[in-house]
Each structure stands twice: as C-alpha cells, then as structure tokens.
Image: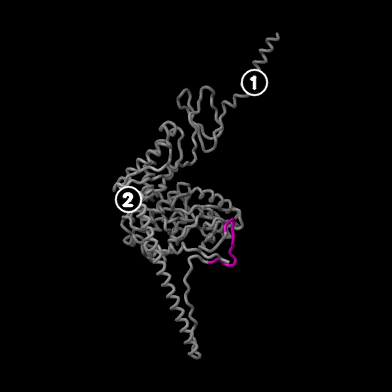
Amino acid sequence: MGDAMAVGWIVLIVVGAVIVLLPAVTVRVVPQASCQVVERFGRYTRTMNAGLNIVVPFIDRIRNRVDLREQFNIYPPESVITEDRVVIDVDMIVYYQVTDGRYATYEVDNYVQSIQLVAFNTLRNIVGGMDLQMLLASREEINAALRGVLDERTSMWGVRVNQVELKTIDLPEPLRRAEEEQMRANSEKRAAILRAEGERQAALVQAETERAVAAARGDQDGAGDRKPAYTPAARRPVHEPLHRDDPRRLGSYRLRARLGQGGMGTVYLGVTPGERLVAVKVIKKEFTEEPMFRKRFRREIDSVQRVGGFHTAPVVDADADGDPPWLATEYIPGPSLDDVLKQVGALPTRTLYTLALGVADALRGIHVCGIVHRDLKPSNIIVSGMGPRIIDFGLARALDGSKLTRSGHVVGTLGFLAPEQFTGAQITPATDMYAFGTVLCHAAGAAPLRDGESLESALELLPAGLVGVITRCRETDPALRPLPDEVLKELSPGPAPSEDWLPPHIRTMVDLHNRPTVSAP
C-alpha cells in the first residue's frame, strides 16, 4: 500500500512538472522586428513572426533567428586597380535589411559575406573601366551602380540593400601629395577671388561715401535747393544679426545669427557646447496652438532622424514639447540654390548635372525611409562645397491637416506643386519628382515662364541630356514619373568631370558662408 502511494506521488510530481515546464519549452516569444525559421526533422516548416508562437519539443528546431531591422556593415579596405593601372584602397559601408527570413536562411550560406563579395567584385569591374581622375569625380555614380547590382543579387536572398557608400579612397603617397598640392592651389585661387571681391566692395563703398560727401556739400552751397542726403549701400551680410526679441539660447545651443525665415518659422545659426555649428529651426507660435501639431511634429522628427547620406542635412536634436518647439540640423555652409539663381542666373551644364545627381540621390534616401518632402524648391536646397544638400525634408507633413494649412488649401510652394497637391489626391514620392523636374527647369534658366509660355517652348534652354528626365518628371500622371534610381541611372555618366563642380563666382558665395560669424549681443 505504501509503495503504491509513493509511486502515485512520484507520478503526480512528474505530471505536475511536465504541466509546469510544458509552456516554457513549447511557447517561444519572438521579439519585435525579427523572425525565426523553424525546421521539423531537418526540413523547413514555417517562419515564426513577432509575438507568441508554439514549438513542439524534440520535433521542431529553430534553425535561424533573423533581425528584420536595418543593419549596416563597414567593410575593411580592398585594393582595386584603375584603368590607368593605379592601385588604390577603397572601403565602403552597406546598409541592408532582411525582408524574407526563409530566403535569407536557405538561399545563401552567409548573406553578410556574400554582400561583401558581390560589392567588391562589382567595384573592381567598375573601377577597372575608369582612370583615376574619373574615379575621384564619380563617387556618387559608383555608389548608384553598386546599389543597382546589389539590389538585383540580394533580392534573391530575401535581403534589400538600402544604401551603399564609398567611405574613403586612399591614394598612393605620390598621388596624395599631388592632390594636396592641387587643393592648396585651389584654396589660394579662391582666397584671391575673395580678396578681389573684398577690395571691389571696399572701393564701391568708398566711392559711394565720396559721392555722399559731395552731395552734402552741394546741399550746403545751394541755398534753399536741398537734395535728399545720399546713404551708401552697405554690403549685405551673409548671416543676419539676431533681432532684439530673438531667443539667445535653445536647449544646449547658443544662437549667434539668423539664417533665414520661412512660412514655418525662423532658422538660426547655433553653436553646440563643443563649438560645432548647427542650424536651429524654431516653429512659429501659430502652429503650436494647433492641438495635433506637436504630435505630428514629434512623429516627423522620429522619421527624419532615420535619414542619412551625403546629400541631406541630418537632424541632430529636437524638442517637440518646447516653448517654442524646435529642431537642430547639421549646419551646411553655403547659399541656397534660390540665392545662387537670383545672383548668377542659369547654371552651367557641369554644375546642373551635379545638382541633379545630388538631389536625386538625396530623394532616394528620403523615400527609402518612407518620407515625402512635399516642399522641394530652390530655397530648400543648399549649395555647398561638398555638393547640394536638401533641408526641411519631412517637415511639411507635420503641417498637413492643421487649421492654418487647411485655410491655405495645400502644403507646399506655388510653382513647384504637383497636380495631385491641388486636387487632394494621394501624396507619394512621385510628388517630389515633379518638384525635382521643376527645380531643374529653374536652375537651367527655363523657368519661371512668362505669361502664355509653355514648358515645351523653353526646353531648348535645357541641356539635351536633361530634357527627357525633366519631361518625365513633370508628367501629370504620377505613375509616369521616374524614380530617383532611374534618374541616377539615366544621368550617369554626365559631362566629363572638371576641376570643380562650381564656377568661381558661385564658389565665392560658398566661401563667404564659411567665414566666421560674429556673435550677437
């Protein structure tokens, strides 16, 4: 009897333990933004998505755990040989994302190493058809070509490549010294232009002062026949001093000057505690009174902080709950494209091609992150020494739906609005491509058009290689407009590279923005 009871207790304990442990060994919690590949008896059965899942012990086996978030790999330098037999070391960074855990598990042994192998094999083939000068001027074109090949290959592995960037190109020592000497020569040339510009401005001010003195003497001599006093025209500063009621500090940033003012707010030049320059945009008070604005603004800040690349101004800090709300981006020293076009007119062909490629590459990076700019125009493009940069991307959507924008009907700037922005149809990345085509028209001198003049009548003002792209971008039907990748492919390669993508007078404007700014009182 006692033995039977003991056996019964043992059975109860075992059964109880099994009941307690069964959920622990059968229930699997898959983290968010990940998946797990399950095999049964060595064969694929299913892919478990995020959440609670059941795995049968001793029968099912988790073959692979896959992170579905965007990843990046910085690959060590590899040696490549140019067409003119120069050996250089190039390293790159690849941003990728697994889209199908099953294919990523079974179609390739190691997709990270496979991406590296394909990337550098492709790079060797591309560089092998270029001389050194072409290579140094074609970094963005090479990035686009690399991504196109990787997109095609990795799609079969359940992987999507979001971005490819060549990080450094190490030249042999003799070539590096020659490059440094050329850079010094270019710097001295630009310094000479700046000195000549300063002397010219000083001469103008001196001449105006002398005329003013002469006018004043004439007034004194001519009894009763006084002329209005002449005021010399002061040279317009690059950065406007702070106004009396402007804030002097926001967050940890000291504000030093005004960079500009638009429909959404005022942009200030700020300085971090480490003396780095940032552009701080402060939102107008009337927007903050809209109940849903801060929520939209916070959401858009989270979105745009994911955007990277060489052709945008990254968001480095923000405060959607501040009074007033603000956000800070990297300061890009240079004038806006709008200022450039107002001062120098239509851009030369080489500059126009570089502008088109840079803006198209930036739009590609913005659209990959699920963001539509909605207000692309010359004043939202900075012309810098390192190429064109897009600013204010994604912020127009924070305004969309507010009482203020509803009273204005549309979000955006007249002259650059796509047809769907007027009709209330769905806003898509194709909306930005319409504005992109219009921006190129302005930069080439084919817009704005006079009354009764059509775009077709102004196409002869455009370089022949841009006519097709611009015409497609300005299609009424969004589905007929090209993607940024298609624009990059069609425009690469453009004209033969020259010493500098900016002509001297525009380079001077850029250099003036690099001058130190005097702090406001």
Give the amino acid type for the residue marked by disc 1 in the picture. Gly
Question: Residue 388, which numbered label?
Answer: none
Label 2 crowding class (10 Å Cα cut-off): few <14, some 14-19, many 20+?
A: many
Secondary structure beneath dot 2 equals: helix
Tell whether position 340 is magenta: no
In percent of width and height, residue 118 lies at 37, 39
N-terminal-most mark, 1 or 2: 1
In percent of width and height, residue 216 lies at 49, 84
Nearest to the observer: residue 420 or residue 254: 254
Question: Would you place residue 179 above or below residue 121 in this image?
Answer: below
Nearest to the observer: residue 337 or residue 188: 188
In percent of width and height, residue 305 lies at 51, 49
Quadrant location of the C terminus? Answer: bottom right
Nearest to the observer: residue 459 or residue 326: 326
Left or right relative to 132: residue 395: right
Quadrant location of the N terminus? Answer: top right
Secondary structure beneath dot 1 equals: helix
Task: Using the numbered discs, state the Cα–Cα distance from disc 1 to disc 2 in whole angstroms.
Answer: 74 Å
Observer able to see residue 229: yes
| Residue in the image at 48% along x and 31% along y | 64
| Residue in the image at 40% along x and 39% along y | 116
User: Which residue position is annotated with label 2?
Assistant: 132
In percent of width and height, residue 185 lies at 37, 61
Give the amino acid type for the residue marked by disc 2 in the picture. Leu
Tell whether position 249 is magenta: yes
Which residues are the magenta region?
241-253
